[in-house]
Amino acid sequence: MDVSKTETKLSDNDLLKIYRHLHQIPELAMHEFETHEYLKHVIDGLTTSYMEIEVPKKLPTAILVLVHGTKPERTIGYRTDIDALPVSEKTDLPFASKHAGVMHACGHDIHMTVALSILNYYSQHQPQDNLLMFFQPAEESENGGKVAYEDDIFTGKWRPDEFYGLHDNPQLPAGTIGCRMGTLFAGTTEVNVDLVGKSGHAAYPQDANDMIVAASQFINQVQTIVSRSVDPIEGGVVTFGKMEAGTIRNVIAGHARIEGTIRGLTQKMIELIDRRLKEVANGIATSYDCKVQLDLNQGGYLPVENNPKLTSNFINYMENQADVDFINTMPAMTGEDFGYLLSKIPGTMFWLGIGDPDSQLHEATLTPNPAAIKIGSSAIIGFLNFRMQQAAN
């Protein structure tokens, strides 16, 4: 269904300007105040008699837009995230980030612009079903999706019956839609480990309790969890990206801290790895006569498990559109807090290619091809129109 030629309030050039402006004003989780103000300004300009806007008091940088349908049988939700990352941009773009040390290195500026393009269309073409657009803060940290749900933002007329959302993918050509049945993204758990022993002089190790040695053994033993406790067909990841211990070469460290992450494609897998980590920590505490404090925090970063029926419908639609480049993708070990919302409300998450194969998500050089905005929003609008024509069930 080609909707790309439809006359709308915002032209393609307007959307490009919006994307570039959003790229220049990245903000961290729960501090998206300038972004919120700009989004609200654009959305206010699109508002019609059949649209409502709500700014939740408990989540003041979020925006909910309810587009009332002509003959609503359900409310279809569409979510976009709006926060950025603590990354110093290295793109040399003329519209590079104006906020030092902060960048849209995960493409949420593309996400927002696509969402505005969708809203732009429906501000001119009242949908059949209700459409709820959710501009969500704090995806990168602070699990904004979980916060929104637990703060009862999705109640009454503001609760969708099904939810959709995208994530950009630099490895796919610009505008390509990617999806799969089952798990799209892994769930994640933050891991913090503090090992406490006794510091002392390097010349008298017998009078100290060396936590560098204990921490090293902990890290080595944890590597066997994935290789020997996890089904290789299912897969899992445990990565420690940070370790701190000691102050000087001739003092034995009495404290060590390790920080890392767990990734699993199912909640069951994450819970297995959690349990084995606790067992290893207890073993190290006994073996090295030290205290091991293990903190595991998953928050709202559950696996992104696509609803079978809705996702089959989505894939079938995209596969049968001559103007949509669709690909069935493999699961990814990246995390997304949309998984929490999908654990409460059935729905589908999918990829949108942005055509930057030389960069990865979260990389300081990420440079999306903005052509993805028009192509992607056209495909999504086509699907939403198709979905609204189907009987509610």
Image (cartoon, helix red, strand yellow):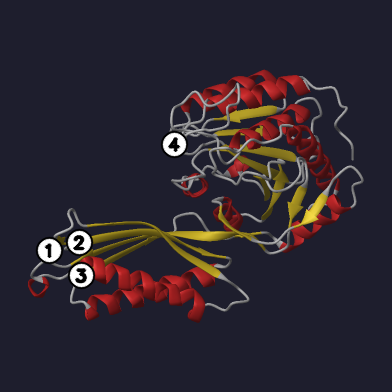
Mark 2 vs mark 4, CA separation in Å:
32 Å
Sequence order check, earlier mark of 3 and 4: 4
Residues tagged 2 and 1 counted as in contact (Cβ below 8 A): yes
* Residue 188 in the image, given as x and y percentages of width and height: 49, 59
Disc 4 target residue: 30
| Residue in the picture at 52% in, 30% down | 55
Mark 3 vs mark 1, CA separation in Å:
13 Å
* Residue 127 in the image, given as x and y percentages of width and height: 79, 35
What's the amino acid at mark 2? His
Q: Quadrant of the C terminus?
A: bottom right
What's the amino acid at mark 3? Lys
323 horizontally vs 163: left or right: right
| Mark in the foreground, 2 or 4 | 2
Disc 1 target residue: 199
| Residue in the picture at 81% in, 41% down | 379
* Residue 226 in the image, given as x and y percentages of width and height: 49, 74
> SS for tag 1?
loop
Mark 2 vs mark 1, CA separation in Å:
8 Å
Mark 3 vs mark 4, CA separation in Å:
35 Å
Sequence order check, earlier mark of 3 and 1: 1
